[in-house]
Image (spheres, helix red, strand yellow):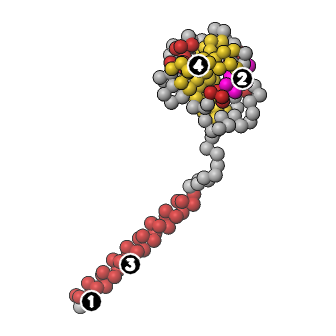
Amino acid sequence: MAAESKGMRGRQTVRDMVLSMLAVGLVVWIGYLFLPHDADSDPVHMVEYKVAAASAKRAAPYPLLSPEGLPGTWRATSVSYTPADLNSGKGNAWHLGFVTPSGQYAAVEQADVPRDRLLADKVAGGQPDGTSDAAGRTWDRVQGEKSRALAAQTGSAATVITGTASYEELAELAQALK
């Protein structure tokens, strides 16, 4: 009788284990159904920058530049204006970031600080790399460790067009600045 009871208990243990695994599997499957998994959606979160640019133009103590007439393939992803009193000594700062048509990053950075100071803040390890002409001015090309830039003194502000985009795309952004 004891041997018979031991064999029955072994089968019950295996049966209980299988039932437990099925219960856990059911919970995992139901959880999977409620998780979003749209792999085809665009991960870029676009922002509207024109209203922010208009507000920043009124607040900035320098002629703030923002692009006009860029094709829709340039997608704005970030925009901000930070007044000098809130910017830890980095001046009145304007930032506008884009994903370019080639999928790279490009940004307009502008502040009322010396050009070299803004450039050092925005392009790590930047070294001179020639010049480019865009929007009626000559821009200094700067190649950094992970990004590049076009830099110019625009009135009382420094303007840096920076990112991982090519110099040609950076120049296209610079050309659209008004």
Front: mark 2 or 1 = 2
Q: Which residue is mark 2?
A: 175
User: Looking at the rendering, in which quadrant would you find the N terminus?
Assistant: bottom left
Residue 4 spot, x, y in % from top left: 27, 89
- Compute the Cα span from label 2 to label 4: 18 Å
User: Which badge, 2 or 3, is on the more N-terminal residue?
Assistant: 3
- Compute the Cα span from label 2 to label 1: 89 Å
Q: Amino acid at mark 1?
A: Glu
Region rendered in magenta: 171-178
Horizontal relation, residue 178 to residue 10: left or right: right
User: Where, by quadrant of the figure, is residue 129 drawn?
Assistant: top right
User: Which badge, 2 or 1, is on the more N-terminal residue?
Assistant: 1
Q: Which residue is mark 4?
A: 130
Residue 82 spot, x, y in % from top left: 59, 19
The crowding category of the residue bearing disc 2, from other C-alpha atoms within 10 Å (few below 14, some 14 to 19, many at least 20), is some
- Compute the Cα span from label 4 to label 3: 75 Å
Q: Amino acid at mark 3?
A: Arg
Observer able to see residue 79:
no
Q: Which residue is mark 1?
A: 4
SS for dot 1: helix
Considering the whole magenta stretch, tell me its main secondary structure. Answer: helix
Q: Which residue is mark 3?
A: 15
- Which residue: 57% across, 57% down? 34
The residue closer to the viewer here, 166 or 173, is 166
The residue closer to the viewer here, 110 or 103, is 103
Front: mark 4 or 3 = 4
Front: mark 1 or 4 = 4
